[in-house]
Amino acid sequence: MSIYGEVPLAAPVAVFKLTADFRDDQNTKKVNLGVGAYRTDEGQPWVLPVVRKVEKMIADDHSLNHEYLPILGLPEFRSSASKIALGEDSPAIKENRVGAVQCLGGTGALKIGAEFLRRWYNGTDNTKTPVYVSAPTWENHNAVFSNAGFEDIRPYKYWDAGKRGLDLTGFLGDLEGAPEHSIFVLHACAHNPTGTDPTREQWKQISEVMKRKNLFAFFDSAYQGFASGDLEKDAWAVRYFVSEGFELFCAQSFSKNFGLYNERVGNLTVVGRDQDNVNRVLSQMEKIVRITWSNPPSQGARLVAITLNTPQLFAEWKDNVKTMADRVLLMRAQLKEKLKALGTPGTWEHITEQIGMFSFTGLNPKQVEYMVKEKHIYLMASGRINMCGLTSKNIDYVAESIHEAVTKVQ
Amino acid sequence: MALLKSSKVLASFGSQTPVLGALQLRTSSWWTEVQMGPPDPILGVTEAFKRDSNPKKMNLGVGAYRDDQGKPFVLSSVRKAEAQIAAKNLDKEYLGIGGLADFTKACAQLALGPDNEVLQSGRSITVQTISGTGSLRIGANFLSRFHNASRNVYLPKPSWGNHTPIFRDAGMQLNAYTYYDPNTCGFDLKGALDDISKIPEKSVIVLHACAHNPTGVDPRPEQWKEIADLIKKRNLLVFFDMAYQGFASGDIDRDAWAVRYFIEQGHNVLLSQSFAKNMGLYGERVGGFTAICNDAEEAKRVESQLKILIRPIYSNPPMNGARIASTILNTPELYSEWLQEVKGMADRIIRMREMLVSNLKKEGSTHNWQHVERLIKEFSIYMTKDGRISVAGVTSGNVEYLAHAIHAVTNFAFKNCSNLMVTGASRGLGLQIVETLVTGGFFPGKIIATARNPDGATELQRLAGEHHNIHVIKLDVVSQESIDKAAAEVEQVVRDEGLNCLINNAGINVVANLETVTADMMLENFHTNSVAPLMVTKALLPLLKRAAAKGTGMGIHRAAVINITSLLGSVELYWGDRANTFKWYPYRTSKSALNMVTRCLAVDLESDGILCMALHPGWVRTDMGGSDAPLSPEESISSVLSVIGGLTEKDHGSFLHYTGEPLPW
């Protein structure tokens, strides 16, 4: 009799399984539109030139060592990361009411924020506070909050499948109907998986209701700069909320915009009413980190901190980010044009209206299955594709395959 | 920013900040009810020791290794592995949830031995974790979710301070079994067996694989055998924590003996591994969690669930450290070099222990330090105040005492400093200076602590009530009248002996950038930070000269003026890569001016034998430094006092970092 006799086999995490299936596919035409990482036009991973440069600086600097970072992380990383999110001249930063915790990627930042909120928000250890995530959302949002102990996780209306765009009325209605103090997870830009963001005017309406209803904003900012190519533009919503007086969290990931996927670099920015509140919040977050991973890994944070704090490297990084964003925008434009040229039924404007790495094609599960099985084009069952998987070499094949799937499969 | 924040600063915040209209809408904070969490002192201790400039120093605090120069040590095998990795120009794609396969395989082999039947039959699963803590955390979560037979976890008494909160937070019930005998300073086999025999079946028992943290006392092989036997009879689930493989004895196989023996005896153990210590990869966060199962099918099921647990915590682990460890473990030349280096580190620890014992003896300690020599590694349980084991709060208590004890050994210079004065002692660093001096037990002289409002300085008054060598004097450094009055009072205290050490610590930070700065703000900051230290020094000059006349050489045994400044005042450092931070015109310029005041005083007072220097105490978590600062006041001041205690002629006219290193002006 084994102690593990009762452990059931868990289903593999979908996105990791898709990658494995793709790897095992022998077909030469295969295309992977499933992964959550940038690819060059040659379909290759890309290490940003500025990252290579800073890596070399670090390697050549033998005064650096492998000592533990503080529990909350590298101070110069945390402050510069928050500055990127809130803006160089953020009044909140000047008023000393911003704090930060270095975390393992965006997931880690959401995790620490969620653990804190369960312990100290809306009472203490209140597992009943409703947490709203967009419908649809990144598949891990649910698990992060439920694993942190939240029992009432609800979807809020976001995607209008018919319009292939934002369901603003539904969204605002759910905000109006949410109990006071509910937590709303908001995608700061480049909504994952739909690629559809509210406009500035729409964000203002969202903010107005959230303030009036006393709702908590937890931003997930995984694509700053990657969406539009412009750091400031992509941070607009977060900064607007801060300017409206919200106390909020912002989980930042540097996986995509720095291409530092496996270094696990993230930051949880905390905006509070004043310094005293932020200090107490951070002191409690320190306790949570200590029993989760003790202290975060240093390499990635060092890379980001040096880049952000060195004007010349910072400028170089912004160029690199723009290179990535521009390629995605180009692929979007081309895919739309090709589908239109093929006369594929339906409207395809949403492909260029959406932003960021992902596009919600609107393909239904059967059509997706057709794409995978018949065309060896791998994408998530939701119809989400990673635009970076498209290259000038495979875009014709992908467009034709979508055309085929849409016309042949209902 | 290392100095005290006056109420004037608060006022200046109010007047200078254009508060947004919208901000007023919400007057209350979500977080008013959040209590301040107690700081975790363990990790910061490394920092404090790092800055200790005494050549005899030993880092016994946080379990981080130091070389013979007391510096962090990067293994040569690690440097070589890093170079090999860099040459490959590898990509930065996400690792799988379970981590780097080459690493997890080698990690399990290191622990179990490459020929272990478990590995050959594939009935174990190893996932990469965020070092030892992350490994324990994943293991605890797994137990909480799937070990339905029992919620009980039994820890040795005492155990690593973080074990309890990790398991508790995962929802397990904590219990303890006897382990350490404070009377013999050794392993209490009988007590352990007695307790284990009463543990309910199917409970989880945590065993430290080697180099028990914090006692450093391990069972001998024949004792392990008895324990393994009993645990089998009681049908307990064993969770090994192995944070020091190779680091304990210098021999990786010897240190893994217990783990391998238990497995051989049929225990399907859980195992946590860390590469922080044995590879010196502390900040890279490299570890592994292994579950040994009945068969390969079961291992697959367990693996699938471990991934489900990891995904909502951090998605997937960091690559850098795993690549380094994997390269070392999988490259024969690097592997053998690493084994040598591990042995070298283990051997040096033994020498460090001997140094500590002899130094404490030399200081005339009445405690019995013999048992220190019996410890296996660098933790500090032997340093508790009564010389015995304290079960509760072991880590934090040890660490605090340790810092004091180390400084008692290293800061003997203060024994020859009869009278010391510190301004701005009501809170922040000034208060910490006073507190560390009196509670560290190495300052027998008189301490004159000044405060603008002594009646409001409750903590300082409390200290003064307990330590009669503290003299609290009222001093408002921006008032000449107050300075003169205070100087007269100081003379009453020090009399013929004169003043040996003046620490000009009082200061403020009037925060303003180019946009917001006004002439009044500049002058206010200047008055407190630049003008006042000069005027205070001037007023006390007769007393400093009086003390200086009695001695030779230079230092606090004779007479010294220490100006607490900031590297933000360094004109040279605020340029290029280091510019564009803390755009504080009043503070930065006032500290630059203070630096020049220091240099001028040094020139003028050299012939009197009065040492003058400027000292940057670091960025400290005080009211003024804020919560983002990396240093606690204790850490900063233990280092600051170490620097002050060691000042000699060569430091006259210098501008030093709290680590003792010179800073550019």
Image (tube, helix red, strand yellow):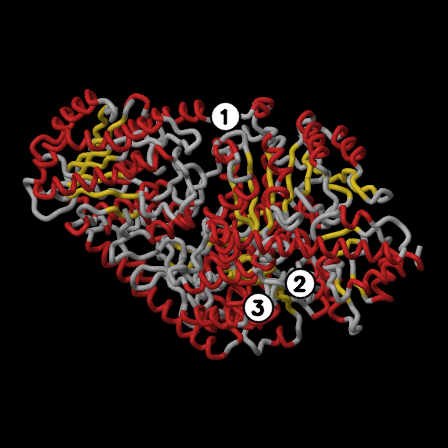
Q: Position of residue B381 (x, y in %)?
A: 37, 52
Q: Are marks 2 and 1 on the same chain?
A: no
Instruction: Tell which of B279 and B14 is nearer to you.
Output: B14
Q: Distance between the residues labelled 2 and 1?
A: 46 Å
- The residue under label 2 is A40
Task: Count every numbered label the image shows and give the total.
Answer: 3
Specify few, some or many for label 3: CA neighbours under 10 Å numbering under 14, 14-19, or 20 or more. few
At mark 2, the secondary structure is loop
Chain ID, mark 1 = B
Return the chain for callout 3: B
Quadrant showing the N terminus of chain B = top left
Of labels 1 and 3, earlier in sequence is 1
Local SS, label 1: loop
The residue tagged 1 is B18
Q: On residue B90, which mark appears?
A: 3
Q: Where is residue B159 in the image (x, y as percent from the top left)?
A: 47, 53
